[in-house]
C-alpha cells in the first residue's frame, strides 16, 4: 500500500498539469526547528535614502508626493513599455520573437517604511485591496492589455532590495506562461466536468481538513497537495469570482483579513519577517468573460527549516522536476499551530 507519509511519490498539480516529487522518508528525523532569530534589523519609520518614502526623490530626480496612505507610480526602470511595436519576427519556426507592449507600476502600501502587511491596521490593508482592484480594472481596461499581474517580493532573499512595503503590477499584451498554463487547465476541466477546478478543489480540502491553514467567511488558505515550496500556500476565494473586480465589500474586508492571517503565521513560524513571493491570478483582461477563472493568490516562501536555511531549486529540480521532503500535510500542521 502506498503510504504518502513514508514512500517517495509523485503528486499531480492539476492547475498546471505538472508533477512534483515528494520524499517524506527524508524527514523522519524529529523536527529540528531551531529558531535562529535573525536579528530583525531596526528599520526606521522613515528612511531618507528610500526611493519609496514620501517626499523622497527617485531615479531621474522625480520627487514622491508627501502621500499619507497608498501611492502608485510608473516604475522608473520598467521591464515593459506601452509604445512597443507588436511586431513578430520568425525564422523557420525556431527563432521566434513578438514585440510585447505593457506597463509596470509600483504600489506603496503605506507611507511608513517599516510596516508590513501583518503589522498594518486592518483598514489600511483593506485600502491596499481596493488599490489592487482599482489597478486591475484601470490597467485591464486599456485596449492593448490582456493580463494584469499583481505581485509582491518580500525580503532580500527574494530579491526585494527595499523593505518599504510595496508590490508591483506588470500589465501586458499577452497572457504570461504560468497563468496561461492554469487557464488552459481550468478551461478544459470546466468543459469536461461542467464545474470549476478550484471550487471543486476547495470543497475537497474543506472536507479533508488536512491541509487547510486558516479560513474566514470569504477565503480559504491551504497548503496545496502539490506544493513545491516547503510552506507554499494557495489563498482561494470561497465564492466563484473570476477577478477582484467582482468582490463585494465584505469579501474585500475578508481578503484583507486572510492576507494578515497567513502572513502573521509565516512571521511566527521562524520568528522572522518571513520572505516570500506572492501574487494573484485572475481573469485575463481581453474582454471575454473567462468563467473558467477563479480568483486566487500563490505564496512561494523559500525558507525551509529556520530563518536562515532556504530551499533552492537546483540540480534535479532544475533539470528534471521539483522535489520536496517535508510533506504539504506537515507544513499545514505547522502553519496552523
Ligand atoms: Zn521607505
Ligand atoms: Zn470556482
Ligand atoms: Zn494560480
Image (spheres, rainbow, N blue to C red):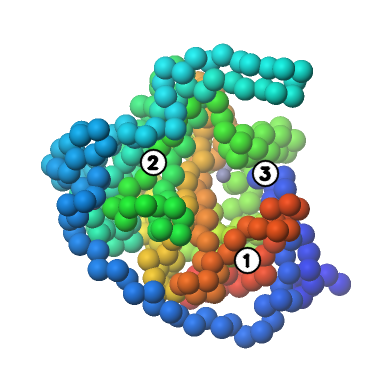
Marks 3/1 in contact by CB < 8 Å: the verdict is no
Question: Label 2 belongs to which residue?
Answer: 168
Identified at 64% across, 71% down, the residue is 326
Q: First in sequence: mark 3 or mark 2?
A: 3
Identified at 47% across, 63% down, the residue is 214
**Residue 240 coordinates in the image, percent (x, y):** 53, 41
Disc 2 element: strand
Q: Which quadrant of the figure shows ligand 3?
A: top right
**Residue 312 coordinates in the image, percent (x, y):** 59, 61
Q: Left or right of 100: which side holds 254?
A: left
- Tell which tag, 1 or 2, sits nearer the viewer: 2
Q: First in sequence: mark 1 or mark 2?
A: 2
Q: First in sequence: mark 3 or mark 1?
A: 3
Disc 3 element: loop
Identified at 75% across, 35% down, the residue is 192
Question: Label 3 belongs to which residue?
Answer: 16
Q: Residue 328 carries which label?
A: 1
Disc 1 element: helix
Identified at 71% across, 73% down, the residue is 24
Residue 247 in sight from this viewpoint: no
In the rendered view, tell whether residue 20 sits above or below residue 178: below
Counting other residues with Cα less than 10 Å from the Cα at mark 3, is it few (<14), some (14-19), or many (20 or more)?
some
Amino acid at each position: 500500500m502506498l503510504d504518502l507519509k513514508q514512500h517517495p511519490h509523485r503528486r499531480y498539480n492539476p492547475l498546471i498539469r505538472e508533477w512534483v516529487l515528494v520524499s517524506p522518508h527524508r524527514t523522519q528525523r524529529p523536527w529540528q526547528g531551531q529558531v535562529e532569530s535573525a536579528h530583525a534589523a531596526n528599520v526606521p519609520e522613515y528612511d531618507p535614502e528610500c526611493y519609496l518614502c514620501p517626499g523622497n526623490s527617485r531615479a531621474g530626480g522625480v520627487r514622491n508626493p508627501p502621500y499619507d496612505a497608498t501611492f502608485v507610480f510608473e516604475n522608473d526602470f520598467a521591464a515593459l513599455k506601452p509604445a512597443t511595436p507588436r511586431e513578430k519576427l520568425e525564422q523557420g519556426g525556431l527563432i521566434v520573437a513578438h514585440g510585447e507592449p505593457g506597463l509596470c507600476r509600483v504600489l506603496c502600501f503605506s507611507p511608513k517604511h517599516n510596516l508590513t502587511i501583518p503589522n498594518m491596521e486592518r483598514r489600511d490593508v483593506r485600502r491596499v485591496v481596493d488599490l489592487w482592484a482599482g489597478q486591475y480594472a484601470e490597467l485591464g481596461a486599456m485596449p492593448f492589455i490582456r493580463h494584469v499581474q499583481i505581485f509582491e517580493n518580500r525580503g532580500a532573499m527574494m530579491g526585494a532590495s527595499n523593505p518599504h512595503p510595496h508590490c508591483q503590477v506588470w500589465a501586458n499584451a499577452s497572457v504570461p506562461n504560468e497563468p496561461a498554463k492554469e487557464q488552459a487547465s481550468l478551461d478544459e476541466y470546466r468543459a469536461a466536468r461542467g464545474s470549476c477546478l478550484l471550487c471543486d478543489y476547495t470543497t475537497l480540502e474543506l472536507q479533508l481538513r488536512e491541509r487547510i491553514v486558516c479560513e474566514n467567511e470569504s477565503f480559504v488558505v491551504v497548503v496545496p497537495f502539490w506544493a513545491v515550496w516547503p510552506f507554499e500556500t494557495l489563498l482561494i476565494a470561497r465564492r466563484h469570482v473570476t477577478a477582484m473586480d467582482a468582490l463585494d465589500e465584505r469579501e474585500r474586508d475578508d481578503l484583507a483579513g486572510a492576507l494578515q492571517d497567513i502572513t502573521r503565521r509565516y512571521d511566527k513560524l521562524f520568528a522572522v519577517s518571513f520572505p516570500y513571493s506572492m501574487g494573484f491570478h485572475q481573469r485575463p483582461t481581453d474582454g471575454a468573460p473567462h468563467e473558467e477563472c477563479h480568483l486566487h493568490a500563490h505564496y512561494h516562501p523559500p525558507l525551509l527549516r529556520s530563518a536562515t536555511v532556504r530551499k533552492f531549486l537546483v540540480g534535479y529540480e532544475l533539470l528534471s522536476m521539483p522535489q520536496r521532503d517535508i510533506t504539504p500535510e506537515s507544513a499545514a500542521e505547522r502553519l496552523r499551530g
